[in-house]
Image: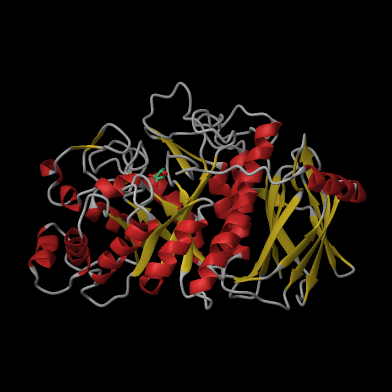
């Protein structure tokens, strides 16, 4: 759960960057896209989502029940389903998070009026279990997403895990397959990923890595898919910078692991007791949040280097299955846990993070932003019948063209954005070529004041036409609300022009631009 805000500039580095900033006058950048050096596939699953039984993430956010006056498809909010389909959600992780290690899957099957209510020991309040296995698996099917189940290791057992998996996936006539049929689902579903525990160093059981690695091996031994459809096994990984955890778990259990997770949240103030407001923040917290997003690059590099010791061929994926901005809960709201607003700052930091995932696509093959609806850095906020799409949603929408594309390396030389003693690169970029040959280039301007002229050189790419979209807003703190839902939303971008083989882009301050080059 713990996050890091790393103040990554020492005085000396800051001084060097100051000189560099002066050289570039803060207004120009050069980006080279290496079409002649194609990299790995950007796995669709890095655009994954995380949906925990927490706050209004599920109830009111996704599930309203078939008898609700809110328009729904068999109990799922129609507006939310359509919005999620539009961003092509590739995979959903459920039911937690911390919740998963206290979850009894049997509470969430059978007639809904017979399901037991339980205390939600992780997040407070009661869990009605109206949304259970059938509701989750059907939901994923409805929106066309893969399924990622977090298994209860903390208070569960290998038997409970294997029975849950059999209940979901068995095709024959075992009592569990028959029970599923009796509960309304004839054909088995497909489980794509299983997470063996969550944050086992913390809410999952306060384990040491050596102990967890052995427990992992035990669970992995009994993890079978009855219909022989492979299920990828994800080990519960490190908290932010804790590479020691990755090292131990990889060394003891690496051969039985398909992916190992990493959790990293950005807290604007760096303090859990006062994380910072999602809407009322100053430039110092804009900067610290973007620095927090930039830290993901170093984190992945460090964990990946440790994994290389045991897995130099990169068979095992690094799965960043919880990431995002964690701010103070929205004041004045009567909402339960972890409801926060979402501003242009969240959009810019999401874009930076996705760029970083692309650059590490050889190792990072799944990621799940925390969380999908009404919780933390959400795609969507709902209030009874109202729904609003967040700036983070807009980035996932603009970036969906990168899903499954081939990564194209980029070099960026540009201004440095500084505030006080802190600094980050002024311009961030990523690129990919999709299956139809279209090259997509994303440019992010981290500077809230300074527009940039970006010269994009396309090496080994024959492009003559460009179109794109831009996401920006009047202020760093701009948000969409239920009453004003269109303050931050993507617009057609006409600031990119070809000339003399170079693409020149007028990149507005505090913006995200995605270009399609043909
Ligand atoms: O996303 C909220 C919580 O953060 C998750 O339940 C837990 O895994 C993490 O600490």
Where ligand 1 lies, by quadrant? top left
Residue at position x 73%, y 66% in the image: 410
Relative to 374, does residue 264 appear above or below in the rendering?
below
Question: Can residue 182 be seen by looking at this rendering?
Answer: yes
Q: Is residue 518 left or right of residue 383?
A: right
Q: Quadrant of the C terminus?
A: bottom right
Q: Is residue 226 left or right of residue 295?
A: left
Residue 311 image position (x, y, % from top left): 49, 74
Q: Quadrant of the N terminus?
A: top left
Residue at position x 65%, y 34% in the image: 285
Residue at position x 42%, y 51% in the image: 82
Relative to 37, does residue 195 appear above or below in the rendering?
above
Question: Can residue 145 be seen by looking at this rendering?
Answer: no
Q: How many marks?
A: 0
Q: Nearer the viewer, residue 436 or 477?
A: 477
Relative to 213, does residue 293 appear above or below in the rendering?
above
Residue 463 image position (x, y, % from top left): 76, 72
Residue 73 image position (x, y, % from top left): 30, 49
Q: Is residue 391 left or right of residue 448?
A: left
Snapshot colouring: secondary structure
Q: Nearer the viewer, residue 17 or 61?
A: 17
Res 210 quadrant in image: bottom left
Residue 470 image position (x, y, % from top left): 69, 49
The furthest residue to the top = 332
Q: Is residue 513 left or right of residue 43?
A: right
């Amino acid at each position: 759960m713990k996050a890091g805000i790393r103040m990554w500039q020492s005085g000396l580095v800051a001084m060097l960057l100051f000189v560099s900033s002066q050289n570039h006058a803060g207004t120009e950048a050069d980006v080279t896209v290496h079409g002649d050096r194609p990299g790995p596939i950007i796995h669709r699953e890095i655009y994954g989502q995380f949906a925990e039984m927490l706050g209004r993430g599920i109830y009111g956010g996704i599930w309203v029940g078939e008898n609700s006056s809110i328009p729904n498809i068999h109990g799922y909010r129609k507006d939310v389903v359509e919005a999620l389909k539009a961003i092509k959600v590739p995979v959903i992780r459920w039911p937690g998070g911390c919740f998963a290690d206290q979850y009894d899957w049997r509470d969430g099957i059978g007639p809904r009026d017979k399901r037991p209510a339980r205390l939600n020991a992780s997040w407070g309040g009661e869990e009605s279990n109206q949304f259970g296995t059938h509701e989750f698996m059907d939901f994923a099917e409805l929106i066309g997403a893969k399924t990622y189940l977090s298994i209860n290791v903390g208070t569960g057992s290998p038997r409970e895990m294997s029975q849950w998996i059999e209940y979901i996936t068995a095709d024959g006539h075992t009592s569990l397959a028959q029970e599923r049929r009796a509960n309304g689902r004839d054909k088995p579903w497909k489980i794509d990923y299983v997470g063996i525990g969550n944050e086992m160093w913390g809410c999952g059981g306060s384990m040491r890595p050596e102990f967890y690695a052995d427990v992992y091996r035990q669970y992995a031994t009994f993890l079978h898919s009855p219909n022989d459809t492979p299920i990828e096994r994800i080990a519960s990984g490190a908290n932010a910078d804790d590479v020691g955890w990755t090292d131990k778990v990889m060394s003891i259990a690496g051969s039985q692991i398909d992916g190992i997770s990493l959790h990293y949240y950005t807290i604007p103030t760096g303090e859990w007791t006062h994380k910072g407001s999602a809407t009322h923040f100053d430039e110092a917290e804009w900067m610290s949040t973007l620095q927090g997003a930039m830290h993901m690059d170093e984190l992945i590099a460090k964990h990946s280097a440790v994994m290389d010791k045991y897995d130099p061929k990169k068979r095992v994926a690094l799965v960043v299955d919880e990431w995002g901005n964690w701010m103070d809960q929205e004041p004045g709201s009567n909402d339960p846990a972890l409801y926060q607003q979402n501003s242009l700052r969240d959009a810019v930091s999401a874009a930076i993070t996705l760029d970083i995932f692309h650059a590490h696509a050889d190792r990072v093959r799944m990621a799940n932003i925390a969380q999908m609806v009404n919780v933390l850095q959400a795609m969507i906020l709902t209030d009874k019948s109202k729904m609003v799409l967040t700036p983070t949603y807009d980035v996932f929408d603009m970036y969906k063209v990168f899903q499954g594309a081939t990564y194209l390396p980029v070099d960026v030389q540009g201004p440095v954005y500084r505030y006080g003693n802190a600094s980050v690169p002024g311009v961030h970029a990523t690129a990919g070529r999709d299956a139809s040959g279209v090259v997509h280039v994303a440019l992010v301007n981290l500077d809230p004041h300074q527009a940039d002229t970006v010269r994009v050189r396309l090496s080994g790419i024959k492009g003559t036409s460009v179109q794109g979209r831009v996401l920006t807003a009047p202020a760093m703190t701009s948000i969409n609300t239920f009453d004003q839902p269109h303050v931050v939303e993507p617009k057609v971008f006409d600031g990119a022009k070809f000339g003399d083989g170079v693409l020149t882009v007028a990149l507005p301050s505090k913006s995200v631009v995605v270009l399609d080059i043909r």
